[in-house]
Amino acid sequence: MVSNLGARRLWVRLTGGAAALVMLTSVAACGGSDGGGSAGSDLKVLVPLQASLLDPTQGSIQSLGVMLLGLEPLERMQSDGSLAPELATDVQQPDPRTYVYEIRSGVEFWDGTPLTADDVVFSFDLHAAEGSDSINSSLWASVASIEKTSDASVTVRLTEPDPQFPYVVAQTGIVSKAFYDSHEDIGTPGVLNMGTGPYEFESFKPSSETVLKANADYWGAEPKYDTLTLRTVTDDSTRLQAVQSGEFDGIFNIPLAQLASYEGISDLTHAHSPDYSVYKFNFDVSKAPWNDIHLRRAVTMAIDRADLVEGPLAGKATLAPTLVPADVMQTLAPSDAVESVYSDLESGFRFDLDAAKREMAQSSVPDGLTVTLPVTGSDPNLSAIAQTAAQRLAEIGVELEIQEVDDNTYYNAVYFEHTTDGLTLDNFGATAPDPSNMALYCLLSSNGLPDGSGVNIAQYDNPQVDGLLQQSQQLATDDPERGQLLLDALEASQEDLPYVPIAFPNVYAAGNSKLQLADFSTFWWLTRWTESAGSAPR
Amino acid sequence: MTAVTLAPTRSPGGLTRARSIAGYVGTRLLSAVVVVVTVSIVVFAFVHAAPGGPEQSIGGRFATADQLAAIRQQYHLDQPLWAQYGQFLSSAVRLDFGTSYAMREPVTAAIGRATATTIPLVLVGWAAATVLGTALGVFSARRAGTPSQRAVLGFTVLGASSPIFATAILLSYVFGVQLGWLPTLGEGNGGSDRILHLTLPALTLTIAALASIVKVTTVRVGQVIEEDHVTFATARGLSSRRVLHGAILRNSGVQLVTQAGAVLVSLFSAVILVEEVFDLDGVGSLLLHAISARDIPVIQAITLFTSIAIVVLNLAVDLLCLAIDPRLRSGLVGEP
């Protein structure tokens, strides 16, 4: 990218620049310096995703990085990954199935109405009530009841213990029940939404731009910026030019392929963090010929994972011995235990073409096979990984026909319908920082089709692994025993090879002096990232 | 007798011609309805044939089969296709295009917001290309074989040869990044801010559309300049401005109007790329988002409005040509 950019710059200066300059003199004279960037305490940031509706039922993962600035949760994730009370002053867990939230008093919505327990119950019910059309409703599946137990407390009872539940609450913005009762088309550009946060929604363009202004009556510390303009730009070159020109102060989740271009921009501070997502090949073990362990072993040993990290991922990733990054697992299990298990898991993924050929000879397809592998253009790393891996796989007789499709076609084939040839490649990201998050999604049989969401792409069904995972779910969120059970589940599943984890990519951000990135992490969207230490003062 | 000849619309020949034109317009409008309905059926079928239904976008990646089924039922996606299309058509004739699956607002509101960006952009780009292209075409035709003609044609061919997204990126880089004069993205917040934000996108469209107008104008005006009546007009001592307006442009009018109409139609598709590169929340971006989310009501409404606009535009061009050239009107009624 650097060389392309340099060539383009040279060409511009030598040819197009002069001609275009003459042509547009009159227009430019009117242009002023508007394109030169923002001023004062206004912050303009490019974010990777925004919801099509300014409503918690339609916000997930990075789009919450915008929504949760206005619609505050009861508990907020801190930069160290812990949770701290926000609209709740206290959280009690009298038993593994029950959470009691004490609601902060004296908090008002932007329209001056007080925050009550009724608002909290209403906000939770948006996702948990039967028939909810929230895209997050599956996260609330373990909820049995949500009750207002006093004027200032709400009790949530679960059907079974769910160690991830606190993180679900941390990504659930609280809205005004009265506002919902008195308005239709909530979350649309004309209606917006009503919260208590330090920033109030000022304007909204679906999936594109949200402008927020400081809430002068905020109950907590004074917001650091007057206005926030958060925009999602789909075109790579447009994003880059928006930062180059200074129109935007920073960007989250820089695509790996463009990293070098951003590193070439002066006066930008860069930050990165290990992502809690994994690039992995998936074998549909319910489908021939991938139900053959010899074929799965052959393909696994023919994939040079280290080469994929250094090549397509440009070294901007960490080799993945399993589905959960070591640093995430170490929040729950002792470091030495994690290191020991992960070392064993890594040795099980050795690259050995001769051994791969021997396994292939024992498989149900000794003469090889041709597989169509869908990839989506929205993540160019998928195509790059597939093309690199295809060269090695061809040596054992597995021919990959890589087919680039649009997002919907890809998601439909890979996750919703499982209509692929049985071998797929994806980048699956966690929805919460809990170590069990990824393991449950990918290994629990109930997450396969036909009854689950299909994110268990391998259709993996191992009663032993199910048992270990379900056992881990019975324990408290911070119980170290839960960590050991998860490690056992990861080890047990690897013997069956439902997946070939390749790498945990890093996630990158960059910003000028206005955007402080000292606390940047892959879960920046769950934190109050605008107010991080060192952010520009008002 | 003199009075009769001075009132041609009341003459039997005038009435016949008026009836013929009315019949012509009526026939065109009927065929337009057929075209629009056909387009909407084809688009409806394609959207439903594409993998991944709207329920997957609405429900999200973690939706279970039961949740997807509930969404299909809620949005009547479980009904037969013909019933869904019938529902769409019966609502559309009442100008009710339903509610967007993704944005949960009336489709007309979303399209109305988007057209506030797209329509001015297309019209300004088209008007600039038409005026500038015609002027450059006349200039080029009058200086056939000279270096200035080659310069004009070379410049316009360069503009036309460049992919529109490359032109957009180049302009954005020069005037937005390097010079910092104009914004590189977004549609601005109204008034002068919007004008600033739409300047580079409009310029991109102008450059893309310029070449064909210059080329047609150069060729047609070049032909007319060679005709006897222009030579006679010049020999009679008429000013070059009168010769240009009265003899050259008037006789080139049909071709120029037809080309201008074709350019305007082509800009409806070109603007999609321009909106993508400049990150404008216009109709093109709305359509792309809708396709990505399988937001069927939005897709159907945009394609319907676009096909109606194109059909009406073509009809307007044809009527304008009839107005410009009496020979075309005579052709309608079979006059010699």
Image (cartoon, helix red, strand yellow):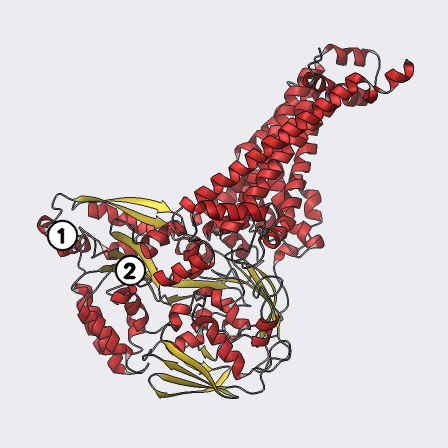
How far apart are the two marked residues, 1 and 2, measured between alpha carbons? 30 Å
Q: Which numbered disc, 1 or 2, marks the residue that appears first in the sequence?
A: 1
Residue B257 seen by the camera: no
The residue carrying mark 2 is: A449
The residue carrying mark 1 is: A356
Query: What residue is drawn where x is 63% and y is 29%?
Result: B28
Q: Quadrant of residue A454?
A: bottom left
Query: What residue is drawn where x is 28% and y is 80%?
Result: A474
Q: Amino acid at mark 2?
A: Leu
The spot of residue B336 in percent (x, y) is 71, 10
Query: Circle 2: is it few (<14), some (14-19), or many (20+) Cα within 10 Å?
Result: many
Vertical placement of B280 versus B8: above or below? below
Q: Secondary structure at mark 2?
A: loop
Name the image quarter holding the N terminus of chain B: top right
Query: What residue is drawn where x is 70% and y is 33%?
Result: B131
Report the front residue among A55 and A182: A182
The spot of residue B216 in percent (x, y) is 63, 24
**In the picture provided, is B22 more to the left or to the right than B262?**
right
Residue B280 seen by the camera: yes
Foreground mark, 1 or 2, reads 2
Q: Chain of mark 2?
A: A
Report the front residue among A224 and A7: A224
Query: Circle 1: is it few (<14), some (14-19), or many (20+) Cα within 10 Å?
Result: many
Q: Chain of mark 1?
A: A
**In the picture provided, is B220 more to the left or to the right than A158?**
right
Residue A340 is labelled as: none
